[in-house]
Image (tube, helix red, strand yellow):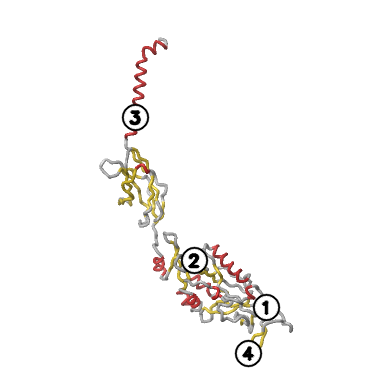
Amino acid sequence: MDKETFFEEYKGVVIAGVAVFVLGIVLLLNFIMSTKQLLMFDLKQTSIKAGDPLTIQWGANNIDRVGIVLFDGDKPQWIVQNLPASAKKYTWNSLANLDAGNDYRVAIFEYPWLKGNMISYASNTFEIIGQKYASCDDFSVEQQWPNLADNYANARKIFITSGVWTGNLGGIDGADGKCNQEAKSMNYAGNYIAFIGSDTISAVERITKPGVFIEAVSSGSLPNGRTCHRLVAQNLQILIDKTKLTKEIAQIQLSDAFARRLGDVWYGRRTSSAETKCLLIGAPGFVNSYSGTHTCQNWATDKRQVYPGPIPETADLPKCYDLEGKNVFANYFGAGIGTVDKEGTYTTSSDSCDAGHRLICIEQ
């Protein structure tokens, strides 16, 4: 049988077969399009902090409204109700009050819930890292010491440097720069000045803004991004008083690191009433040794003596009266410091400019 004869005899069958095939495709597509479908996609976030948003996504067909439920083990709770299925995405922002756990699961269902309606579960569970602290009060209770938030009104951060420097600080500006350099390395926000005085302005006079002093290092973080800080002093006068405590009391009222470093700082002229000349150097090994200034020549020298040998008769040095009333030359370079005396009390003393001490840094 040739092709033309075959086609003539079976043309009707071929046409009928094609029609059946097309009809089948149409019916299949119609079935697919008319069938309800609902699929919860796997969560991309498998670990999330309480308070952070959770993104939920799904696919849906021939479903008008959906509801989403959170399961903590077998315990369900609403996430959202009566949401358009066509949205196909929902961001949940209400995790802040949930307990920490690693067995949370999300499910989506055809809303409202009726017998026979569709439901789909995310195949993966996720973990909520719960917030340990809700406020700085929690840190206060834990540490048994007042803690304030970094945005507390007029709160000013304070720290004592880990670095030590000789009296050649590069002037007052150089000391401020050292504070800010260390603050930056420690990720302490803000601008800082060194709590030291020069021949023309005292350390106290440099603190021109009133405030509450808190440690720059944080006690911990809160869910809202704020940080908590241990209270050091309610005002400048109390801060000064803290530098006169006994070592035992300081260890109670100050953190370990702060108390330990407080006995090793440069001050220069701490108050406006401090003298500008004839500083008796109180460091061990110095007997009747006086400095011409209290500030290492305005923080510009790291020398120990003006004349290491005999003092020339033509020397232009300030004259000072020693403890016995004798007139002596101020042949040394020195500055006021903070230290601990023999009784274990924080006090002011002095040292030569070639020694190394820390800086107290206060946020401006």
Instruction: Evaluate if marks 3 and 2 touch, with contact meaning CB atoms under 8 Å apart.
Output: no
Label 3 or label 4, whichever comes before in sequence order = 3
| Residue at image mark 3 | 28
Q: CA distance from mark 4 to mark 2?
A: 48 Å
Picture coordinates of residue 15, whole percent (x, y) = 36, 18
Specify the quadrant of the image occupied by residue 170. bottom right
Q: Is residue 242 above or below residue 73?
A: below
Q: Amino acid at mark 3?
A: Leu
> For this view, does 290 lie left or right of residue 257?
right
Q: Is residue 219 above or below residue 102?
A: below
Specify the quadrant of the image occupied by residue 292. bottom right
Instruction: Evaluate if marks 2 and 1 touch, with contact meaning CB atoms under 8 Å apart.
Output: no
Q: CA distance from mark 1 to mark 4?
A: 22 Å
Q: CA distance from mark 3 to mark 2?
A: 68 Å
| Residue at image mark 4 | 325
| Residue at image mark 2 | 217
